[in-house]
Image (cartoon, helix red, strand yellow):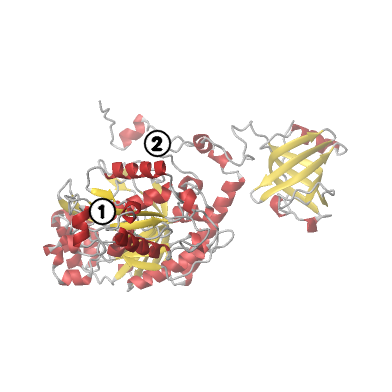
């Protein structure tokens, strides 16, 4: 069969747009053959473009068109000229938006053929992700993927519109640049012209956006690609996209308000739209650790509860609990009564997880059976029950029909250390970890992670006042917990803690958190050269090293730098959440695998000898 030329033919409609009010109209559609059904005298073609699918009927009476429909195969590219008609009674397909009509073909053009694809884009789910990534162009034809990228485009546009409306300028910053200290490894680009020298791909536009504030742009944003060579971790991409912004003369509140604004605009693009209520919950890092044991709290489940005061010195004495350490409890709602065996295996699983760290579970059910401890059990139960009312209240605990909650109380046994790996908050963190672990284990029971498609699914929070420094046990140094341009709290600078007590210095750094994941982070920056130099020094960087790495930036700071601050949020993750997708790869058109490979292009790949020579590189085989 010879192929047809498009000539001047133009389409009149997209496939997915056809409705019964188009009946009687002449149309021209173009797209791919999604499915073909041969009923002898009649051939049905499901024609697909990015808007959806339309059914085309080709009657053998239209000889030439019928011959072509006969030759057409899935994924052939065709154009149809014909008219729309209502489908006969009983032949409508209520599952298709175009299911009330079909197109009767007068003419069919075969514009291109297709080899038999390794999988059909007409299928909903293709199990093997490697196959999908290798033939990504076919995978992207699938309705679900088309929907994800239409959503992504709308979300990006809504964010742009919002920020431009707030006075932001979109400014691009370079890809070939110098290293940015975001804590990952750099991707390097060797220079041909300068032998032995390299550009680094930006881990973020951090230094440039700060320089743009020095340049007087006042409000900058960019939907920016960032490159980080990190260790293999599920759901990380070596290159990813951030909504990156910077503001001159801001308070933290200014940054929060703008971020809440663009997130509200982005969530309104979900289908159906999700309305967010602002302002989001705010808590300090210390509050997050005390209540959730983690700096990215998942507030869909009740917070941890301190039972430290309830366990009086006398009770601790009797129950063999360390005197000075916290006792923490939490509730996993609606787990239901556990059988004796289930309870025992849960206890041993948790105890095995604690290992020899000193923590143990307190068996509240057993306390109840003892006259001495029953009052304590009652107090614990009352306090834990109180914690469940903060999250999506369902049935009153204890009310008829309510399902029993799982109550977990963790105590430090005698001899439990106050610090673990130099961390005095380790008990809160360890119990917080258990809370998340049990929350995941009983997800089917409590149902709090199920998507209802409403705002209730999304628990946002701002976490503020992060520690400025992190102790690095390996190198025995204080590292910057955020990047080193983050401003310490003014009070901590004034109190001299930068030198006297690094562990206590708070940073003007903040994270926006959603359902236990960090969506983005930012900070108010250091705008004074003397403070910046002092921070580099306090991080163990000599003046010479600081000059070598960031000299241009330190110089720039000396020419009238306004106070400034900003934030960056991962666009990929936001779209993934709004699409209800299970991985970032579902919302990145050409992603890499967990091993950082592009299976479609087969990248990375070897360079030729000639290229290497030009770049002054030689490959050394490591044995
Ligand atoms: N550059 C930071 C990051 O990529 C964000 C910021 O501080 O604005 O996490």
Which residue is the extreme one toward the front? 371
Earlier sequence position, callout 1 versus callout 2: 1
- The quarter of the rendered structure image containing the N terminus is top right
Mark linked to residue 411: 1
Report, in whole angstroms, how far the alpha carbon at label 1 lies from the one at label 2: 51 Å
From what the image shows, is residue 188 above or below residue 502?
Answer: above
Determine the secondary structure under disc 1.
Answer: strand
Determine the secondary structure under disc 2.
Answer: loop
Is 593 on the left or on the right of 490, as rendered? right
Quarter of the image for residue 48 reads top right
Which residue is the extreme one toward the right? 61
Which residue is the extreme one toward the left? 500
Q: Can residue 132 be seen by looking at this rendering?
A: yes
Residue hosting label 2: 604
From what the image shows, is residue 35 above or below residue 255?
Answer: above
- Please state the horizontal and vertical placement of residue 431, each as a whole percent of the image: 30, 53
- Please state the horizontal and vertical placement of residue 354, each as a whole percent of the image: 27, 45
Quarter of the image for residue 500 reads bottom left
């Amino acid at each position: 069969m010879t192929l047809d030329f498009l000539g001047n033919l133009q389409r009149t409609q997209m496939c997915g747009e056809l409705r019964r009010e188009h009946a009687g109209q002449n149309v021209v559609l173009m797209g791919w053959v999604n499915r073909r059904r041969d009923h002898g005298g009649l051939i049905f073609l499901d024609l697909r473009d990015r808007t959806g699918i339309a059914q085309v009927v080709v009657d053998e009476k239209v000889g030439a068109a019928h011959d072509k429909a006969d030759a057409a195969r899935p994924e052939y590219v065709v154009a149809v000229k014909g008219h729309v008609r209502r489908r006969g009674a009983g032949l409508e397909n209520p599952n298709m938006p175009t299911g009330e009509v079909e197109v009767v073909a007068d003419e069919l053009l075969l514009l291109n053929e297709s080899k038999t694809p390794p999988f059909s884009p007409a299928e909903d789910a293709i199990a093997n992700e490697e196959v999908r990534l290798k033939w990504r162009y076919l995978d992207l034809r699938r309705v679900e993927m088309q929907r994800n990228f239409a959503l992504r485009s709308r979300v990006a546009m809504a964010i742009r519109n919002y920020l431009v409306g707030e006075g932001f300028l979109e400014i691009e910053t370079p890809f070939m640049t110098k290293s940015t200290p975001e804590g990952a490894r750099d991707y390097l680009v060797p220079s041909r012209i300068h032998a032995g020298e390299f550009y680094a791909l930006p881990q973020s536009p951090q230094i440039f956006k700060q320089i743009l504030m020095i340049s007087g742009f006042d409000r900058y944003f960019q939907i920016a690609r960032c490159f980080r060579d990190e260790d293999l971790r599920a759901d990380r991409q070596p290159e990813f996209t951030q909504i990156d912004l910077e503001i001159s003369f801001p308070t933290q509140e200014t940054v929060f308000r703008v971020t809440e604004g663009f997130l509200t605009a982005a969530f309104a693009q979900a289908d159906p739209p999700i309305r967010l209520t602002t302002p989001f919950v705010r808590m300090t890092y210390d509050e997050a650790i005390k209540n959730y044991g983690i700096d990215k709290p998942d507030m869909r489940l009740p917070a941890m509860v301190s039972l430290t005061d309830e366990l009086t010195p006398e009770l601790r004495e009797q129950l063999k609990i360390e005197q000075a350490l916290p006792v923490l409890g939490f509730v996993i709602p609606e787990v239901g009564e556990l059988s004796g065996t289930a309870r025992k295996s849960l206890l041993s699983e948790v105890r095995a997880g604690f290992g020899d760290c000193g923590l143990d579970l307190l068996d509240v059910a057993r306390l109840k059976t003892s006259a001495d401890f029953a009052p304590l059990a009652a107090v614990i139960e009352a306090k834990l029950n109180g914690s469940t009312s903060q999250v999506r209240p369902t049935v009153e605990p204890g009310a008829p029909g309510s399902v029993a909650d799982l109550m977990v109380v963790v105590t430090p046994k005698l001899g439990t250390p106050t610090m673990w790996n130099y961390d005095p908050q380790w008990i809160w963190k360890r119990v917080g970890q258990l809370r998340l672990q049990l929350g995941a284990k009983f997800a089917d029971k409590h149902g709090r992670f199920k998507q209802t498609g409403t705002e209730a699914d999304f628990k946002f929070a701002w976490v503020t006042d992060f520690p400025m420094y992190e102790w690095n046990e390996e190198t025995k140094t204080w590292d910057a917990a955020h990047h080193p341009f983050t401003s310490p709290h003014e009070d901590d600078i004034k109190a001299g803690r930068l030198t006297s007590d690094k562990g206590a210095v708070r940073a003007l750094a903040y994270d926006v958190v959603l359902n236990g994941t960090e969506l983005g982070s930012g900070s108010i920056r250091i705008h004074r050269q003397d403070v910046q130099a002092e921070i580099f020094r306090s991080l163990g960087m000599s003046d010479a090293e600081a000059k070598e790495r960031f000299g241009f930036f330190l110089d720039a700071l000396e020419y009238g730098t306004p106070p400034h601050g900003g934030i960056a949020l991962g666009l990929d993750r936001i779209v993934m959440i709004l699409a209800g997708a299970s991985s970032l790869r579902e919302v990145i058109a050409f992603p890499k695998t967990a091993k950082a490979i592009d299976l479609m292009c087969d990248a990375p790949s070897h360079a030729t000898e000639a290229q290497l020579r030009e770049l002054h590189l030689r490959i050394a085989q490591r044995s």
